[in-house]
Each structure stands twice: as C-alpha cells, then as structure tokens.
Amino acid sequence: MQRSAAIFHGLTKAIPPKGSVFLTRTPRIATIELNSPTSRNALTPSMMLSLHTIVEDLQTNPPPFLMLTGANGTFCSGADIGVAASTLMTLEGGEAMSNLMNQVMNNLKDLPSVSFAAIDGAAYGGGAELATCCDFRVLAPAAKLRFVQAGMGVTCGWGGARRLSNIIGEKEALKLMLFRTIVTPSLGIQNGLVDYVSEADSPTAADFTRSTLIEGLQDLDAGIITSLKPSVQAEKIEDEISVFVKHWGGEPHVAAFQRAMEKSKQFKE
C-alpha cells in the first residue's frame, strides 16, 4: 500500500464501509464500476481505497482498454463526505483524501491503457474531476458534467483543475469552475471536454462505448494499443523512436504488411 493510502486508511479505518467499486475484465477491456445507490455513486472512504487497490492491480497488468463508469444510471457525484464528516472535514482529513485521490487519478491517467469515462446521468464535483483522468469522455444524450466546487466553498481537490486546463485550456477551465456551467453533450463537444455522445438507442453510455467504440477496434493488436499513449506522450524524439522500433518487424507488423501486399497484388490483377 502506498504511503498516501496507508495514511488515509489509518484516518478512516473506523468508518463503516459503504458502497463498492467493481472491476471486471475481459482479455481486452477492464471496466471499473462505481456503485453507491443512496448517494449517486459518491465515493466513500472505503470506495476510494478500493479504487486505489484496483488501479494498482491495473498498473501490474494493464489492459488495452479501460472503461470507468457508474451504476444506477449515473456516474459520480464526488465525495460522500456525509459518512465521515468528523474525519474528512478536518485539515488533516482533507489533505489525506486529496493526496490519495490525486495519486489514484494520476496513476489511472498514466496507465498505457486507452481509457474511456462512460457517463450517464451526472458527473458533478469530484465526479467531473474523475472524468478528466480518462483519455476520452463519452456522454449519454441526457448526461451532464459540472464543476460545483467553488459553490461549495472549495477548489478542486483531486487534480481536476489541472487536468481540465490541459484538456480545454486555462481560460475555458476557469469559466467552467467560476460559473459552475452545466456541461451538456453539445457544449462539451464544442469546448472539447466531451469526445463522443452515445446514440439514443444505446441503453447506456457504457454499452455504446463497449459495442461501438471499443469493439470496432478488434483489428488492432493489444500491444500496439498500449503503445499509442507512450508514443503521443513522448517528450523526446528518442522516446517515440524507442516505442516504434519495439514493434517494427514484429508478428502483427509482418502480418499486416503481408495482407497489404496481397491486396495490392489483387488490385493489380
């Protein structure tokens, strides 16, 4: 257990567990589902620690694709402070929670897995911050995001302000946080916070993400998928080259080359 998790666990171990975080895996997709029905999937201390453990496991064996979603028709409404107000509403408790959740979200964001936040219902406060640690955000037609922190007398505590600025720019991020704008799918597509809107006939954003976006990429080799992020995030050309040469002449490359040559041959005939 990392130091931030150990400190947070020590502060909150007397608080009864509430809610759950589930991890399910197939050979190509790992799905993290938040589930706390009575609080719109707000994260309790036990859920935060579960999420930490799950992300640690994914670091050891990262899947090609990762989907983060919520149960009960909604995504996440931030932190469930009500279950632990006497602990978390202190300076020590707030700092411990912020350290833990920043670590969790940074680790999730840094996975080589291509990640999707599949959002039904609302992603408010910390839930909106959570959505920013994924590579893509997929909203159901009626879904919405909102950074409500300023109205609660606080700023983003889980690293969401920095990530939001990186996604849409500092000025647009400041607008969303200052005016607490409700980000609908159309506004999100316009400002770049939302990448896809699920089709009306899809039961959930998660179903659309899985069946339309991820399953449409079955032709891609798993090793290639987990090399795309390191490639685009490379700070030096040498880093990008090292990713490239790792795959050049490999089995997927040779097979794709042979298929291309066969198609070219058929076209000439």
Image: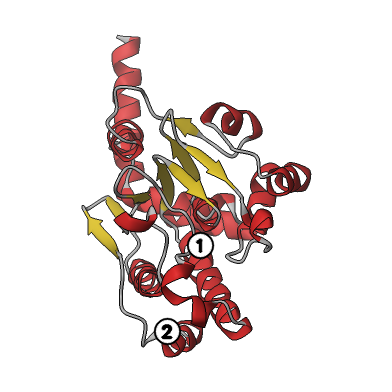
Placement of the N terminus among the 4 image quadrants: bottom left
**Residue 249 seen from this side:** no
Image position of 227 with respect to 212: above or below? below
Q: Nearer the viewer, residue 219 or 118?
A: 118
Give the residue drawn at x 73%, y 41%. 172
Pinpoint residue 75: horizontal percent, then vertical percent.
Answer: 40, 48
Quarter where residue 94 is shown: bottom right
Give the residue drawn at x 49%, y 88%. 7
**How many angstroms separate mark 2 from mark 1 (CA)?**
27 Å
Pinpoint residue 138: horizontal percent, then vertical percent.
Answer: 44, 38
Pinpoint residue 242: horizontal percent, then vertical percent.
Answer: 53, 59
So how many labels did they put on this image?
A: 2
Residue 110's tag is: 1
- Please say if the residues under marks 2 and 1 sit with CB atoms less than 8 Å apart: no
Q: Nearer the viewer, residue 236 or 66?
A: 66
Image position of 101 with respect to 37: above or below? below
Placement of the C terminus among the 4 image quadrants: top left
SS category of the residue bearing label 2: helix
Q: State which tag comes first along the sequence, 2 or 1.
A: 2
Residue type at numbered disc 2: Thr
Q: Residue furthest top?
A: 269
Q: Nearer the viewer, residue 59 or 9?
A: 9
Residue type at numbered disc 1: Asp
Coloring scheme used: secondary structure
Query: Relative to 21, is 87 on the left or the right?
Result: right
Give the residue drawn at x 36%, y 82%. 15
- In the picture of the structure, the residue carrying the numbered disc 2 is 12
Pinpoint residue 9: horizontal percent, then vertical percent.
Answer: 41, 85
How crowded pointer 2 is (Cα within 10 Å; few <14, some 14-19, many 20+) is rated as: many
